[in-house]
Image (tube, grey):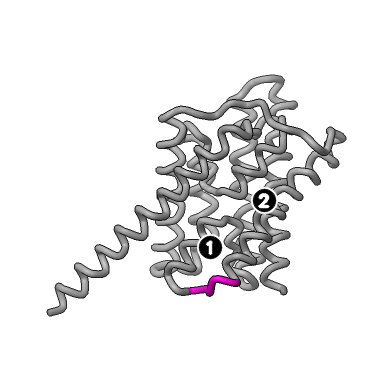
Amino acid sequence: MRSYLSEFMGTAFLLAIVTGSGIMGDTLGAGNAAVALLGNSIATGAGLYCLIVLLGPISGAHFNPVVSLMFWKMGNMDLPKLLAYWACQFSGAITGIWLTHLMFSLPIIQESTKARNGLGIWVSEFVSTLVLLSVIRIGDQEAKERVPMLVALTVTAGYWFTSSTFFANPAVSVARGFTNTFVGIAPQDVLGFISAQLFAVAVLMIVTRMMSSASQRSKF
């Protein structure tokens, strides 16, 4: 139960940080999208680092269904735990959105009208998810103690080098459909994001399996 609560709370706070800093940046930037994105990216990276350091020892600090899916495929967790993590992550993400609306005295129930679609966006989400999962996988094997910083810096940079602003997270994608603020995404565009994210998981698993097979053959 500690690990499930950790995933719920961690994902909720992550979305509160993402959404709240987006609202604050947009408000203080007086419509300057660059200023808003700068504040949004810095706050997200800093908050994510803290959450991973504090909650990592409890649940692994996935906060992301595709991260959990990758670890399940690697054999690090069983199917019931994967499904429980997904439930905690999706519900936590939406709760974080609603909490942020409450903090900023906005209508709690919203629906985003911000269109985010097109080939460039979907390729961006594929690349974003592939980069994030690769950083986590390699970091977990080669530099475990540095994973929080690696992930936080990757996400911060991802805001700026991808056209989709580095969602790379199905729970985040779904939840951001429930906020008509700076970080929102129109609900009809969510499926495209999730499809690209899942495709990245499949590609990573295929490449990993091929590399593992090649490594085993080279030993003989």
On whether residue 189 falls in the magenta region, the answer is no
Tag shown at residue 68: 1
Label 2 packing within 10 angstroms: few (<14), some (14-19), many (20+): many
Q: Which residues are magenta?
A: 76-80
State how far apart marks 2 and 1 are (Cα).
Answer: 16 Å
Query: With 36 as the anchor, is 76 left or right in this view?
Result: left
Q: Nearer the viewer, residue 114 or 99?
A: 114
The single residue placed furthest to the top in the displayed view is 31
Q: Is 193 drawn above or below residue 116 in the view shown?
A: below
Question: Does dot 2 land on a helix, a strand or a loop?
Answer: helix
What type is the residue that disc 2 sits on? Leu
Residue drawn at x 46%, y 40% as measured from the top left? 125
- For residue 40, which quarter of the picture? top right
Q: Amino acid at mark 1?
A: Ser
What's the magenta bit mostly, secondary-structure-wise?
A: loop
Task: Tell me the element at label 1.
Answer: helix
Q: Residues within 10 Å of mark 1 (few under 14, many from 20)?
A: many
* Image-based side of 168 in relation to 210, left or right: right
Residue 68, horizontal then vertical, whole percent: 53, 62
Image location of residue 50, percent across then percent down = 65, 58
**Residue at mark 2:** 14
The image's mark for residue 52 is: none
The spot of residue 155 in percent (x, y) is 52, 46
| Residue 85 figure quarter | bottom right
Residue 51 place in picture, x, y as percent? 65, 59
User: Residue shown at 69%/50% (left/top)?
Assistant: 93
Check the image and report above or below for 108 versus 78.
above
Q: Residue furthest bottom?
A: 220
